[in-house]
Amino acid sequence: MLKDRECAMRYEESMLALENEKSTEIMDLGNFPSRDQLRGLAKELKKVENTQLYPYHWFAGNVYLRELEIPEDVFCVGKIHKHEHFVVLAEGACRINTDAGMEDIIAPHIWVSKPGDQRALYTYQDCTFLTIHANPDDIRDVMELEKRIVDHEDVWYLEEL
């Protein structure tokens, strides 16, 4: 499954990160973390993590692409999206909850995120994630797109944190 020698070496390096004491926190979520577990992790992270993440926004032909760079050794819990969309790990290695359970993934890696999915991850290396969303009205207002894309019914990550 690993595509080349360099990719295999990066995977071995990422496996060494499993021994990192901090990385065990996300593994304590179990193989398929519940929404309550993700909420609890997000609350705890808000107390200790102070990494600010600033997305880049790209627009082309009724497509909205959101690029997010996450530094090495960072835990984060993502937002809940309303619609199916592509997710690309373009660079780096991380541990993340997937439909198959907790997995170590290395770039390049592509998957489809379903409505209501929420991810928790720990970065072994600097990571670059891309989410690709339909934008049928070709809107360029990021706040309006956020309203359409993110599930604001479950706003605990905005209000309680």
Image (spheres, rainbow, N blue to C red):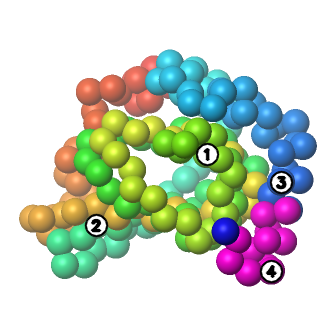
Q: Position of residue 57 (x, y in %)?
A: 37, 67
Q: Position of residue 48 (x, y in %)?
A: 70, 31
Q: CA distance from mark 1 to mark 2?
A: 23 Å
Mark 1 or 2, nearer chain start:
2
Q: CA distance from mark 3 to mark 4?
A: 15 Å
Mark 1 or 3, nearer chain start:
3
The residue under label 3 is 15
Give, as a single range, the part of the protein colored magenta: 2-12
- Dot 3 falls on a residue whose secondary structure is helix
Q: Residue at x 80, y 80 (%)?
A: 5
Q: Residue at x 44, y 29 (%)?
A: 157
Q: In which quadrant of the rendered image does the N terminus lie?
A: bottom right
Return the residue nearer the eye: 159 or 121. 121
Mark 1 or 4, nearer chain start:
4
The residue under label 2 is 64
Q: Is residue 140 left or right of residue 5?
A: left
Mark 3 or 2, nearer chain start:
3
Q: Residue at x 14, y 69 (%)?
A: 138
